[in-house]
Image (cartoon, rainbow, N blue to C red):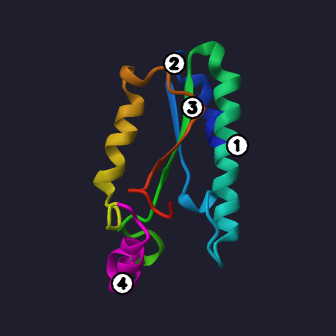
């Protein structure tokens, strides 16, 4: 991700947006997920540095951190395993696992001019998972 961002920076217009994706695992600990969580934590730190370093160009950088989403990720276990889906629903304030359509609107919102002043933030989009 670092090298991709570095390669794309000359192509990003002043006033542009960078949105990186993290995970709830960067906020809470789950055994067996340390390597993944460490990488996502690094993305969050990198995003804050991007926000600071690119601010003079008016480029914002934010991180969106989805909770458990019922997709193909990790073999589709949240989507396809009823027990895991129930466990996720049980620790989520809104009472269900997320779906991809729960995340897209937040990303679209951050890309809009309405949110031009949102910068260097970690925005969790998890339905209140593990609060």
Question: In front here: 118 or 13?
Answer: 118
Work out whether mark 1 precedes mark 3 in sequence or the reverse, and give the earlier one: 1
Q: CA distance from mark 1 to mark 4?
A: 33 Å
Residue found 28% across the figure and 52% down from its top: 101
Residue found 59% across the figure and 32% down from its top: 8
Q: Which residues are magenta?
A: 78-93
Circle nearer the viewer, 2 or 4: 4
Q: CA distance from mark 2 to mark 3?
A: 13 Å
Q: CA distance from mark 4 to mark 3?
A: 35 Å
Residue found 71% across the figure and 33% down from its top: 49
Q: Position of residue 62 (x, y in %)?
A: 55, 36
Q: Position of residue 20 (x, y in %)?
A: 54, 43
Res. 45 mark: 1
Work out whether mark 1 precedes mark 2 in sequence or the reverse, and give the earlier one: 2
Q: From the image, tell me which residue sits under label 2.
A: 13
Work out whether mark 2 precedes mark 4 in sequence or the reverse, and give the earlier one: 2
- Magenta-span inclusion, residue 84: yes
Res. 61 mark: 3
Circle nearer the viewer, 2 or 3: 3
Judged from the image, the secondary structure of the residue bearing numbered disc 2 is loop
**Pointer 2 and pointer 3: residues touching (CB < 8 Å)?**
no
Judged from the image, the secondary structure of the residue bearing numbered disc 1 is helix
**Pointer 1 and pointer 3: residues touching (CB < 8 Å)?**
no
Which quadrant holds residue 119?
top right
């Amino acid at each position: 991700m670092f090298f991709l961002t570095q390669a794309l920076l000359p192509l990003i217009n002043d006033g542009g947006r960078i949105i990186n994706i993290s995970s709830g695992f960067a906020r809470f600990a789950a055994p067996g997920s340390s390597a993944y969580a460490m990488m996502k934590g690094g993305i969050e730190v990198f995003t804050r540095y991007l926000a600071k370093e690119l601010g003079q160009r008016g480029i914002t950088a934010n991180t969106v951190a989805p909770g458990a989403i019922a997709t193909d990720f990790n073999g589709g276990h949240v989507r396809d395993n009823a027990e895991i889906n129930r466990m996720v629903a049980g620790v989520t304030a809104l009472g269900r696992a997320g779906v991809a359509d729960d995340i897209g609107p937040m990303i679209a919102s951050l890309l809009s001019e309405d949110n031009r002043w949102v910068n260097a933030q970690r925005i969790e989009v998890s339905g209140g998972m593990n609060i």
